[in-house]
Image (cartoon, helix red, strand yellow):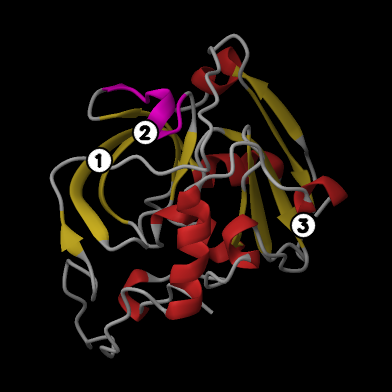
Amino acid sequence: MSDDDDLPLPGRTKLIAAKERWAREGRGLTGAAPPAARPRLPPGQRLVGDFPVLDLGTTPRLSERDWSLSVGGAVERPLAWRWDDFRAQPQVETVSDIHCVTTWSRYDNHWAGVAARHLIAQVRPRPEARFVMFRSWDGYTTNVPLARFDDDDVLLAHSWQGAPLTPEHGGPVRVVIPKLYLWKSAKWLRAVTFMEKDQPGYWEIRGYHDEGDPWNEERYR
């Protein structure tokens, strides 16, 4: 992680301070053990019909012309995509549930974008690559094991419910990793770095769990 990752992000809000306090207090933890057969709704979650907006206090408003993505680190073929390059890749559509660490879940989200496995095939991670760091246009970062990114329901999404992602929900492009809490699905994606060793991201530094599995209630450290 570069030195500028340690600097305060612009637009720091009371929400950020509150969420750091929730991490210290273990807010939302039920103590329930994961069942042998996982229910659709993870423990401690409540179902909502809307799509709440949570961010760090700033909303990057990038046009498709301004957007770009760089992918590098422990890979054989680093790449850089502009919008036309991204849209020229094979496109997929998925339907998945999403689960926020703040205890809300939303069912049946229809996404469209580029499959993570296609991106992985393009860059060819080296054998020593074990983790991935996502970086966003607002300075946000979050980390996941490569095995979590390399899954059939993970994608770099440009559309939700049949329409382009709005800036509030991470457009032009966000990560979608349905099997983890939503803070791992970085909005306003700018860069993907494959790493040999794990490194914590923005919320992980501030008390959130390193992996973030909703059914194991991996909310906080």
Q: Residues within 10 Å of mark 2 (few under 14, many from 20)?
A: some
Quadrant showing the C terminus: bottom right
Element under disc 3: loop
Q: Position of residue 132 (x, y in %)?
A: 65, 56
Give the mark toward the camera: 2 or 1.
1
Of all residues shown, which one is farthest toward the front? 14
First in sequence, mark 2 or 1: give its number: 1
Q: Residues within 10 Å of mark 1 (few under 14, many from 20)?
A: few
> In this image, 186 relative to 194: left or right?
left
Q: Is 170 inside the magenta-drawn segment?
A: yes
**Quarter residue 82 falls in:** top right
Give the mark toward the camera: 3 or 1.
1
Name the disc covering residue 126, or none.
3
First in sequence, mark 3 or 1: give its number: 1
Q: Nearer the viewer, residue 164 or 46?
A: 46
Q: Nearer the viewer, residue 48 or 179?
A: 48
Q: Position of residue 85 (x, y in %)?
A: 60, 18
Q: Are marks 3 and 1 in contact (CB under 8 Å)?
A: no
Q: What residue is disc 1 on? A: 51
Q: Which residues are magenta?
A: 163-171
Mark pair 3, 1: CA separation: 37 Å
| Amino acid at pointer 3 | Arg
Q: What residue is disc 2 on? A: 92
First in sequence, mark 3 or 2: give its number: 2
Q: Residues within 10 Å of mark 3 (few under 14, many from 20)?
A: some
| Amino acid at pointer 1 | Phe
Q: Which residue shows up at 20% across the image and 50% down it?
A: 106
> In this image, 34 relative to 49: left or right?
right
User: Please, is residue 194 above or below residue 10 in the view?
Assistant: below
